[in-house]
Amino acid sequence: MALKIILPILILLLGIGAFVGIGKLKKPPQRQTSQQLGILVDVIELQAAPHQVTVHATGTVQTEQEIALVPEVSGKVNWIAPRLVSGGLFKNGETLLKIEQSDYLLTVEKARADIARAQVALKTEQERARVARQEWQRVALPDKGEPGPLVTREIQLQQEQANLAAAQANLQLASLNLQRTELKAPFNGRIRREQVDLGQYLRAGTSIGSFAGTDRAEIHIPLPAQELKWLTIPTAGSTQSGSTAYIDLPGNRQTRWQGRIVRSLGEIDPGSRMATVVVVVDDPYQLAGSSGLPDLATGLFVDIELLGTRLDSIISIPRDALRNNQQVWIADDNNRLRLRPVDILRREQRQLLISKGVSSGERLIMTTLSPAAEGMLLRPVLQERRL
């Protein structure tokens, strides 16, 4: 009876002991530590480097020289150059047209005849003066002194000398007018406009067209006044070369002409607050040699890139890296976000030049964060910079 009571108790105790022993053999569950991950961002490394300042603008090509074609003498046109049409090219000194010369040839002959008559009259008067002096010396008393100009015919002699000089001047004028019957190109250029026909009677001083130079073209470029400090602009009498200019057709950088700044107009437009510099391009019509470029024709609207000051060492950043117009985001050595104010030296088309606020070797965040909090943990991924 006692055994029946003790045996179940013993079995119960053994079961409890086995359960406790098995529990002690189990390993306690490991505590998992949570690792905080930063926000993934793209960064570029900042480096100070030499930089060529460039100023971008637009403008319209125009002629450097343009004059009205005006005959200096009147007459009927009896010859016209075949190239005397709009767009026709002429070299300096080439004849554009000729005016009938008959009247002017006769005027030259008459002037020569007048000179011959004046020379004869002068010689005659010189002989009369010589005879008059001899006659006075023959009859004059010893104490009478020198004879007067009327006695020696000095006044008449001076009159004949003046007549000869006038006749010679008339010949020069007649010869000059004869030369003017040929209207010549005053410089290398092309006909922009003409209104003259063979047989037409021209009056001196009446325009028959316009003539534009082809040696150089000009582009007047309006710029914000603050851009002038970055450019080299020659002053009057200076031998200094102006800033180089590259001229492109809009949307086509394969066609590029080279020019230079030659002057500023020296005033600020009161309405736009813009200054104007003048760029010159030599040989815009490729007449001096073949460069493979098309004509830089008058009236073309072009893009201009002006090469300004060269900076020895400056940090530049992409324009889209600027935050709140005066701030950049930097990933520090602990991969924490730093909000950094910067001073902008210059804003260019694709980048900003920074004078203060960042240093070489720092990592500039390019990814947009919202919100961006000082000290935010980051996971920077270094990217290659592309401009």
Image (cartoon, rainbow, N blue to C red):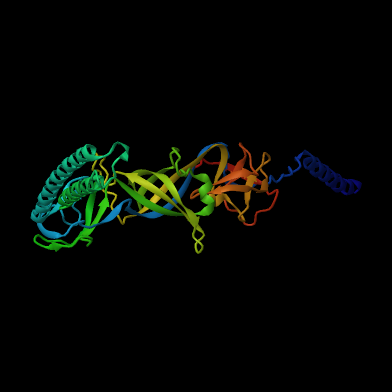
- The picture places residue 330, in percent across and down from the top left corner, at 64, 45
Q: Viewed as shown, does residue 225 lie left or right of 358?
A: left
Q: Is residue 153 above or below residue 100?
A: above
Along the viewing direction, whichever of 340 and 94 lies nearer the viewer: 94
User: In which quadrant of the rendered view does residue 361 lie?
Assistant: top right
Residue drawn at 81 percent across, 45 percent down: 15
- The picture places residue 231, in percent across and down from the top left corner, at 49, 44
- Residue 10 appears in the picture as rendered: yes
Q: Viewed as shown, does residue 312 lie left or right of 265?
A: right
**How many numbered discs sit on the rendered protein?**
0
Q: Residue furthest right?
A: 2
Residue drawn at 41 percent across, 45 percent down: 262
- The picture places residue 58, in percent across and down from the top left corner, at 40, 54
- The picture places residue 101, in percent across and down from the top left corner, at 10, 53
Q: Viewed as shown, does residue 249 lie left or right of 314?
A: left
Q: Is residue 162 above or below residue 269?
A: above
Along the viewing direction, whichever of 116 and 217 lies nearer the viewer: 116
Residue drawn at 22 percent across, 58 percent down: 70
- Residue 39 appears in the picture as rendered: no
Along the viewing direction, whichever of 321 and 118 lies nearer the viewer: 118
